Image (cartoon, helix red, strand yellow):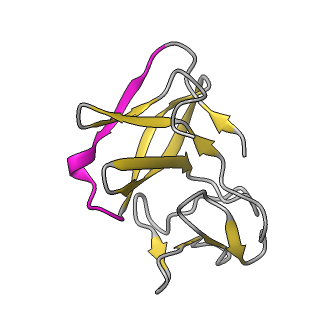
Amino acid sequence: MSSLNRPHEDVPLVALAQIEDGALVEVETVVAGAPESVLVHRDGGAARAWLNVCPHAGRRLDWAPGRFLRSREGLLVCAAHGASFELAGGECVAGPCRGEALRAVAVVVRDGQVLLCADGDAGR
């Protein structure tokens, strides 16, 4: 899975306290020099992030800005074509892009903030 990051410095995305445990939020930021929509998932005191783009057709995953569909099993469901992604690593486990994965964005939680990592190894 490729990891995308900003080359110069860690960038604050969102306060961890603003995300309910297990929830997803959408933030706009610059990734690898381009403006991107990024989804951030909180898992206890940790966070994971991916580009808000389905690998199947390149469409946004949210059904409205920052509004994500979840299955009964807790999977993230693409609003366009129903692909289902597990949130431990972003792998598609059902739907048209089964076996592919969301494009990870390296993040770290530091001092209560979710930061976009300058170092591509962080957050993996």
Q: What is the x, y in percent for residue 101?
A: 70, 57
Query: What residue is shown at x 52% (from left), y 21% (from top)?
Result: 118
Q: Is residue 79 above or below residue 30?
A: below
Magenta residues?
9-22
Query: What residue is shown at x 22% (from left), y 50% (from top)?
Result: 18
Say which of 64 and 73 sits in front: 73
Q: What is the x, y in percent for residue 79?
A: 57, 73
Relative placement, left or right, of 5 versus 23 is right
Say which of 115 and 81 sits in front: 115
Q: What is the x, y in percent for residue 15?
A: 25, 41
**Residue 120: quadrant of the picture:** top right
Q: What is the x, y in percent for residue 40?
A: 43, 50
Magenta stretch holds residue 89: no
**Residue 104: quadrant of the picture:** top right
Magenta stretch holds residue 21: yes
Relative placement, left or right, of 103 versus 9 is right
Query: What residue is shown at x 67% (from left), y 62% (from top)?
Result: 91
Say which of 106 and 11 sits in front: 106
